[in-house]
Image: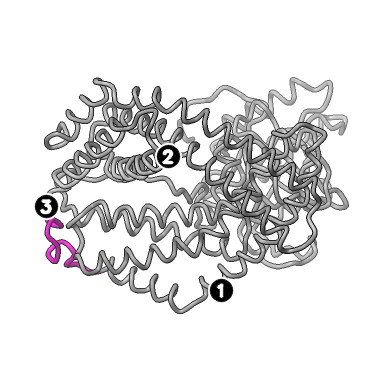
């Protein structure tokens, strides 16, 4: 018998046969120990849903759309098995976005996790459910045992045509109590824990099924998470950064084209910005001629994706715009919503055409081929130098620029000075995030947090100005395109006024934010980290 530590008996624990033991072998052994009868099998179609970036799974659970006979239900299963499954509601078809759910458990559970992301099917399973009734000497049912065999759905077909020759990707054995027979239930559970034929199953069904089919849950992230050797050639580190960012672009491309949700384009554009920043800020590491060429081409890509993203931003912010107005004027903004929806569709159509163009396809092909070259370091000025040396020098130079630009700003400085400071801060942030793994984690975290806080203020300040100007432009465009109610134009004017007042508030907060970033302690951190070989 296999020796193993007996876990605490949890009534919600599921079991699965151990490797090398089939379900029928387990049931044969069960029959030697208990008398049972089996009910007619039932079938459940399960579609597990999550966002492209796995926000529900990362947020603590799984969402499943179950179809059993004529029943349709959404079920939320927390990773913490002690909380148990929660039926969120009965629906014929799961809504696509969190805000599409009616008020109640579904919206309050799913909405905050999804935010603006759409639900996507992650895996379709057909589960064969066999219910065994364990009997006593009087043939009374004392315990029920639920056995689930889940297989991927390969094609649309009736439940009774399920291909049983296809091996299941997951087998779950669950005990179900019968009132008045607690001792019998405890006896069965103890027998399961003691058996060498089954083992307690801890991963969730979604994770187990995806792993069994060769996939991996939470397999996408746009976050920069590199592990670089400080002494590796700088060109090799930069190549890895660019390959990762190219992968992010390619993974999001289908969602951008299909307009599944706004975050596909957001992540696509962030990868473009980071690519351009790595090309321009990590100087002398890649061949100069190639750097100039690709900077120009990725700048073009950033430009053609901008108008669609603008429409996304204003549509996502529409509810906040409306709610910022007095209640009696909120309904007057609805024509603006219709305008934004119509123009988002137009801009997206033009974007799809550009992403299908020879220019885009050639850019991606050339960039991929360039990153595959083995002589990048030898063909550049600093590519073969140790990464810590190149990174520290460039971060030190950019930090000095940020401090000089920030120190020069006072209450009389024009908005353009804050905009230039924001651009420099973004470059500094990207540099630190690209190479943070070569510096002590307990030291570089502080400077990164401080630059993010400063950028939040500068970003809000500029975004509010841009939004106010854009809404004024929209108002003129709406008048040119047709009759627009005067009340809508007045409401938009009130909205612009509120945005500009908020912008001035952010301007007033800048001095405090910058003073915190530029205090003596933070300047000393920068000097200690980047003043020589990164403090190593």
- Residue 101, image quadrant: top right
**Judging from the image, what secondary structure is the residue with disc 1 in?**
helix
Q: Is residue 195 left or right of residue 445?
A: right
State the residue position of label 1.
353
- Residue 420 is a magenta residue: no
User: How much space separates mark 2 and mark 1, taking CA atoms?
Assistant: 36 Å
Counting residues from the start of the chain, the first of labels 2 and 1 encountered is 1
User: How much space separates mark 3 and mark 1, taking CA atoms?
Assistant: 42 Å
State the residue position of label 2.
415
Q: Position of residue 114 (x, y in %)?
A: 63, 42
Q: Position of residue 91 (x, y in %)?
A: 83, 47
Residue under the point 41% across and 30% down: 453
Q: Position of residue 444 (x, y in %)?
A: 28, 31
Region rendered in magenta: 373-385
* In-front residue for pair 179/139: 179
State the residue position of label 3.
385
Q: Position of residue 432 (x, y in %)?
A: 29, 40
Residue 209 lies, with reference to residue 257, above or below; the image says above
């Amino acid at each position: 018998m296999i020796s193993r530590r007996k876990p605490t008996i949890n009534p919600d624990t599921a079991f699965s046969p151990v490797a090398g033991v089939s379900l029928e072998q387990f049931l044969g052994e069960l029959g030697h120990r208990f008398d049972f009868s089996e009910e007619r099998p039932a079938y459940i179609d399960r579609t597990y849903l999550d966002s492209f970036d796995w926000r529900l799974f990362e947020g603590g659970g799984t969402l499943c759309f179950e179809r059993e006979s004529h029943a349709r239900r959404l079920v939320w299963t927390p990773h913490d098995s002690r909380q148990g499954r929660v039926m969120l509601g009965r629906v014929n078809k799961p809504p696509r976005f969190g805000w599409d759910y009616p008020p109640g458990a579904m919206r309050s559970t799913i909405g905050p996790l999804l935010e603006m992301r759409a639900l996507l099917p992650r895996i379709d399973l057909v589960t064969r459910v066999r219910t065994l009734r364990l009997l006593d000497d009087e043939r009374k049912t004392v315990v029920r045992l639920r056995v689930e065999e889940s297989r991927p759905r390969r094609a649309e077909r009736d439940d009774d045509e399920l291909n049983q020759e296809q091996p299941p990707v997951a087998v779950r054995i669950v005990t179900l109590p019968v009132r008045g027979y607690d001792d019998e239930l405890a006896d069965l559970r103890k027998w399961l824990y003691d058996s060498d034929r089954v083992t307690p199953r801890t991963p969730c069904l979604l994770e187990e099924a995806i792993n069994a089919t060769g996939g991996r849950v939470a397999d996408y992230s746009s976050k920069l998470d590199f592990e670089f050797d400080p002494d590796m050639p700088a060109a090799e580190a930069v190549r890895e950064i660019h390959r990762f960012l190219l992968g992010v672009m390619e993974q999001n491309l289908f969602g951008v084209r299909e307009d599944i949700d706004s975050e596909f384009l957001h992540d696509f554009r962030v990868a473009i910005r980071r690519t351009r920043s790595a090309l321009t800020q990590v100087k002398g590491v890649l061949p100069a001629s190639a750097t100039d060429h690709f900077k120009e081409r990725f700048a073009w890509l950033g430009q053609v994706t901008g108008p669609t993203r603008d429409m996304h931003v204003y549509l996502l912010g529409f509810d906040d715009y409306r709610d910022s107005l007095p209640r009696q004027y909120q309904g007057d903004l609805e024509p603006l919503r219709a305008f934004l929806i119509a123009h988002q569709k137009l801009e997206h159509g033009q974007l799809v055409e550009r992403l299908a163009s020879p220019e885009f396809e050639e850019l991606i092909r050339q960039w991929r081929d360039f990153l595959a070259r083995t002589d990048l370091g030898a063909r550049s000025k600093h590519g073969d130098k140790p990464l810590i040396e190149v990174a520290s020098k460039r971060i030190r130079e950019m930090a000095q620029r940020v401090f000089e630009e920030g120190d020069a700003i006072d209450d009389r400085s024009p908005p353009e000075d804050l905009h230039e400071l924001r651009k420099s801060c973004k470059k500094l942030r990207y540099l630190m995030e690209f190479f943070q793994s070569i510096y002590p984690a307990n030291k570089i975290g502080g400077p990164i947090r401080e630059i993010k806080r400063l950028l939040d203020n500068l970003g809000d300040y500029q975004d509010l100005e841009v939004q106010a100007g854009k809404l004024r432009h929209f108002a003129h465009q709406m008048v040119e395109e047709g009759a627009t109610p005067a009340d809508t134009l007045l409401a938009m004017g009130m909205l612009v006024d509120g945005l500009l007042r908020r912008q001035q508030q952010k301007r007033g907060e800048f001095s405090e934010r910058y003073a915190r970033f530029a205090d003596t302690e933070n300047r000393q951190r920068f000097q200690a980290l980047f003043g020589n070989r990164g403090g190593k």
